[in-house]
Image (cartoon, rainbow, N blue to C red):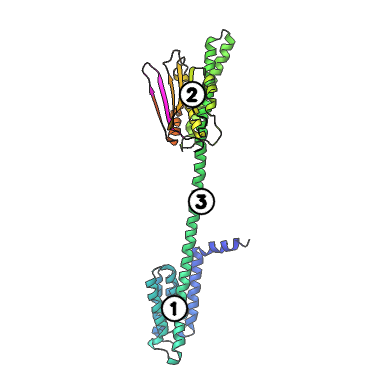
Amino acid sequence: MTRLVPRAVERLSGTRGFAVVVDLTLAAAAFIDVAVSIPSWSTIETALALIAVAGLLVRRRLPWVSFALVLPGLVVDSMTIAAPIALYSVAVRTRRIPLLVVAGAVTFGCFLLPDWQLPAMDFLAPALLYALMYAATPIALGALVRTHRELSDRVAELSLARETERARERQDVLRRERVRISREMHDVVSHQVSLVAVQAGALQVSSPDPESRRIAGVIRSLAVRTLDELRQMVGVLRADGARTDSAEPQPTVDDLPRLVRESGLEAELDISLPTDLAPPLQRAVYRTVQEGLTNARKHAPGARVQVTATADTAAIDIVIENDAATERGIHLPSSGTGLLGLRERAELLGGHLDAAARSGGGYRLRVTIPRRDSEH
């Protein structure tokens, strides 16, 4: 509750109606200040006093004009309210110190020499001190208020920038997570579902039982439809496309024999890799072999596949080669992001990917990655 009151006052003070009320109140106070002396003043003195009071009404929009309108009345006779209000308004809206010094000096002189007469010597020192305080106090107060406003605006800008940065970081986290999910969906789910589709297609062709062939056809149809929907989902998830690697535990090179064995392909595996490879390198090797087997199964059914993974002191070399297809292929939807994902993964690790067709209808996929052992 105690915090709501200052906030309510702050919101009220920023309204136009509040500013009008304050200006009218200050003008009324300045008029009351001179009203008691008007009967003894001349017409010129009265006119200058009224002009000074009216000048306070424009102090927000035209502070220097308001200050100029107040000064003549200050010279004719001391106006203890109007002049410091006008000088305060100037100080609030002016950052140039030389101008403020000039305005303060003019106010000091006009207050010290009413009716262009120097005070008596007995009162000169107190008059000088009083005039100095009269001119310096509004400037100091105005500068303080202006500095407070500037600092408040700066704090508000910093708060907004911080919130914007936090929002951007949240979006980046979400984007990275979306890309991670899309990559894992393609690398894992697509691989498994395409394997189901291939095995179901093979069963549909080779089974002598009509019912088994029908069920196999349904399974293959569902698998193909799932791959198509998966392709669309991966495309949506990768729409914002930020590069990232999964933070989740992933298969290692020890899982490669099982991967090749379950691929349903006539594949030979030749691995000569050290056991101390860093986890990112092991995942890269596994995903490269997985993608190569998936592409061979899709585009070269019945072909022989050769998988080679070797390492020297500088780099790791993974090569997946397949001959031309020997069987009629089954059309499977493709997301088109498999090689893109592999290329991104290789580049993030400082390597590169080469993929090209071989003479005779085969295909060759090669990924080379600089070697980093686990202790590094």
Residue 163: assigned label? 3
Q: Is residue 343 above or below residue 331?
A: below
**Local SS, label 1:** helix
- Residue 227 horizontal/vertical position (percent): 51, 24
Residue 375 magenta-highlighted? yes
- Residue 228 horizontal/vertical position (percent): 50, 25
- Residue 269 horizontal/vertical position (percent): 49, 20
For label 1, the residue is 135
Q: In the image, what residue type sits under mark 2?
A: Ile
Given residues 84 and 347, the one toward you in this image is: 347
Viewer-nearest of discs 3 and 1: 3
Magenta-highlighted residues: 356-376
Q: Residues within 10 Å of mark 3 (few under 14, many from 20)?
A: few
Marks 3/1: CA distance?
43 Å
Given residues 347 and 155, the one toward you in this image is: 347
Residue 271: assigned label? 2
From this viewpoint, is residue 127 visible? Answer: yes
Q: Residues within 10 Å of mark 2 (few under 14, many from 20)?
A: some
Q: In the image, what residue type sits under mark 1?
A: Ala
